[in-house]
């Protein structure tokens, strides 16, 4: 069962056995690892060990595995001479042998491939293989310095893959990886292109060799998307669950595809965990018995994925792993529908939060499964069904509430607009009345005394009935004006204005002159 982790990146399901088993099916895997002296530089040896251990750890009991190390010569590690079943015990032994590898010697490509194919042929002849597809993963950081040259190496690989296909009806795919700027690109890419394989260049400083090498399953995943494998399911060997701790269980998983495109686009894997004690009760066998192990093997090897890909589809996988440089030039395109997934702009392809689904937290199995023991249909008291109906009614009520709030806001805004309009109209009417009243008042605030000087003149000669009709503000204004005039009944006369000078007159037109 899933375990929540506070730090991201600590768990990658793509590297779990149940994921690889469902996405690639049963297979024979041969790892060929360069351990020459140059692998000591830039931590390449540690990268190679980590990648090899990751690949071995993802294999299941339905797979067979062998690891070949090479420098000046090549040999199979772990004390084996052929491929062995990827049981937990065998994987632990191989992983320990990988950890003990030391970098030393020159680089011999020919001996490395020859040893790998010898191990494969011996395993097939002894009928101890998975009986399905073969994957040879070859990793180097340099160029072949001893042994036969480039042409002999490419010819060897082509001949041995054709022999496996002709003599044993086995399909072999060679995956080559060039680690670092000094690594050979010519031979490794030529081998991949000539055998229908995939070559991937990996930068030792910024690249991810683990992800690059462990992504070989993507080619087999395309084969599992074929119509004949729609019902394929993979079982893994029982293992110790982390939650609850110490509980033995297994996982059955199936691949998921988008079948609206051709070839079907691989989306991921869905798996279901089961406790082994429940399976033991049903089958009446011990989970660690050989009979139980054989059951898992038979369940997982029911079908072998058929890999039928066109040259353009193979180039699409090469482009997906190493960009345009990794393609073999058979298709002059960079868009491959169904293989390279299209990303939505401004939106992550990953889910935002994987821990929102907590509806079943703390429930017993019967309640989570929505059925009683022995039944195959949901019961009437199924929590999921009840929660669905409850959530549906809650959604309806919440929708009605939202609509009511919106209508209320619209009505309130309309009433407010009408109120503001009426208020402004009333103020305009009141202002008009005041102006009309003020225009009726016969008050002259400024005038002239005929001498060119301004003075205040109040008309006090209105008839009595006119004065009675004046308003209180007008009467008060008249009183204030009268009082200001009475304060100085004899104001000093204004200074006499001097006569303006006469304009200059042309003597020729002066009428005052006599002839």
Image (cartoon, rainbow, N blue to C red):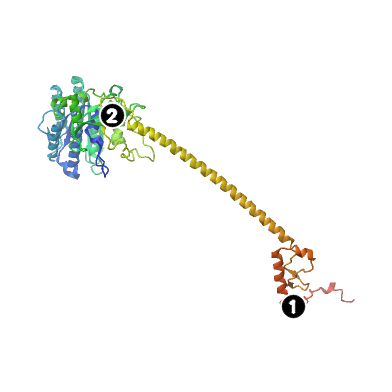
Mark found first going from the N terminus, 2 or 1: 2
Q: Residue at x 20, y 45 (%)?
A: 42
Seen from the viewer's position, the closer of residues 6 and 308 is 6
Provide the residue designation for mark 2. Answer: 255
Q: Residue at x 15, y 23 (%)?
A: 124
> What is the quadrant of the N terminus in the image?
top left
Categorize mark 1 by other alpha carbons within 10 Å: few (<14), some (14-19), many (20+). Answer: few
Question: Depth-wise, is mark 2 or mark 1 nearer the camera?
Answer: 1
Provide the residue designation for mark 1. Answer: 489
Q: Is residue 438 left or right of residue 16?
A: right
Seen from the viewer's position, the closer of residues 304 and 109 is 304
The CA distance from mark 2 to mark 1 is 115 Å
- Residue 86 x, y percent position in the rendering: 16, 30
277 versus 474 height, above or below: above
Q: Name, please, the residue furthest toward the right.
A: 515
Asked which secondary structure carries label 1, the reply is loop
Can residue 191 be seen in this snapshot?
no
Categorize mark 2 by other alpha carbons within 10 Å: few (<14), some (14-19), many (20+). Answer: many
- Quarter location, residue 496: bottom right
376 versus 402 height, above or below: above
- Residue 165 x, y percent position in the rendering: 21, 22
> What is the quadrant of the C terminus in the image?
bottom right
Asked which secondary structure carries label 2, the reply is strand
- Residue 408 x, y percent position in the rendering: 51, 43
Q: Residue at x 29, y 21 (%)?
A: 228
Tag of residue 348: none
- Quarter location, residue 53: top left
Number of callouts in the render? 2
Q: Residue at x 64, y 54 (%)?
A: 427
Can residue 430 be seen in this snapshot?
yes
Q: Name, please, the residue furthest toward the left.
A: 79
């Amino acid at each position: 069962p899933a375990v929540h982790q506070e730090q991201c990146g600590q768990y990658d399901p793509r590297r779990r056995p149940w994921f690889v088993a469902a996405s690639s099916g049963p297979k024979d895997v041969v790892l060929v690892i360069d351990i020459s002296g140059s692998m000591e530089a830039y931590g390449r040896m540690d990268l190679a060990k980590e990648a090899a251990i990751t690949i071995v750890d993802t294999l299941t009991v339905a797979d067979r595995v062998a690891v070949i190390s090479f420098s000046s010569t090549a040999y199979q590690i772990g004390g084996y001479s052929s491929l062995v079943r990827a049981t937990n015990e065998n994987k632990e032994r191989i992983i320990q042998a990988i950890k003990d590898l030391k970098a030393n010697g020159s680089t011999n490509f020919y001996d490395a491939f020859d040893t790998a194919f010898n191990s494969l042929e011996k395993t097939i002849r002894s009928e101890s293989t998975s009986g399905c597809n073969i994957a040879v993963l070859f990793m180097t950081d340099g160029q072949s310095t001893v042994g036969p040259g480039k042409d002999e190496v490419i010819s060897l690989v082509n001949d041995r893959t054709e022999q496996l296909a002709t003599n044993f009806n086995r399909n072999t795919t060679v995956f080559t990886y060039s680690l670092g700027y000094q690594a050979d690109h010519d031979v490794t890419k030529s081998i991949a292109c000539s055998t229908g394989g995939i070559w991937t260049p990996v930068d030792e400083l910024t690249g991810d060799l683990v992800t690059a090498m462990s992504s070989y399953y993507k080619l087999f995943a395309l084969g599992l998307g074929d119509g004949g494998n729609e019902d394929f399911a993979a079982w893994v060997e029982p293992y110790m669950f982390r939650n609850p701790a110490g509980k033995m269980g297994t996982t059955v998983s199936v691949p998921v595809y988008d079948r609206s495109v051709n070839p079907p686009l691989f989306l991921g894997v869905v798996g279901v965990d089961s406790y082994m004690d429940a399976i033991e009760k049903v089958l009446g066998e011990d989970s660690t018995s050989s009979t139980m192990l054989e059951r898992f093997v038979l369940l997982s090897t029911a079908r072998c994925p058929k890999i039928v890909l066109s040259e353009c589809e193979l180039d699409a996988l090469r482009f997906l792993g190493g960009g345009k440089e990794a393609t073999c030039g058979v298709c002059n395109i960079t868009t491959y529908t169904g293989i390279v997934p299209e990303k939505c702009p401004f939106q992550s392809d990953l889910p935002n939060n994987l821990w929102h689904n907590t509806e079943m937290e703390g429930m017993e199995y019967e309640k989570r499964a929505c059925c009683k023991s022995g039944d195959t249909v949901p019961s009437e008291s199924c929590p999921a069904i009840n929660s669905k109906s409850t959530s549906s009614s809650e959604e309806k009520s919440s929708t009605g509430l939202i609509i009511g709030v919106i209508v209320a806001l619209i009505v309130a805004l309309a009433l407010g607009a009408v109120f503001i309009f009426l208020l402004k109209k009333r103020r305009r009417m009141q202002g008009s009345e005041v102006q009309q009243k003020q225009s009726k008042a016969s008050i002259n605030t400024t005038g002239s005394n005929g001498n060119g000087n301004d003075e205040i003149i109040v008309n006090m000669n209105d008839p009595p009935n006119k004065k009675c009709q004046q308003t209180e503000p007008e009467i008060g204004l008249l009183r204030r004006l009268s009082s200001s005039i009475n304060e100085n009944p004899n104001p000093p006369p204004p200074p006499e204005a001097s006569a303006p000078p006469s304009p200059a007159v042309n003597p020729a037109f002066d009428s005052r002159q006599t002839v």
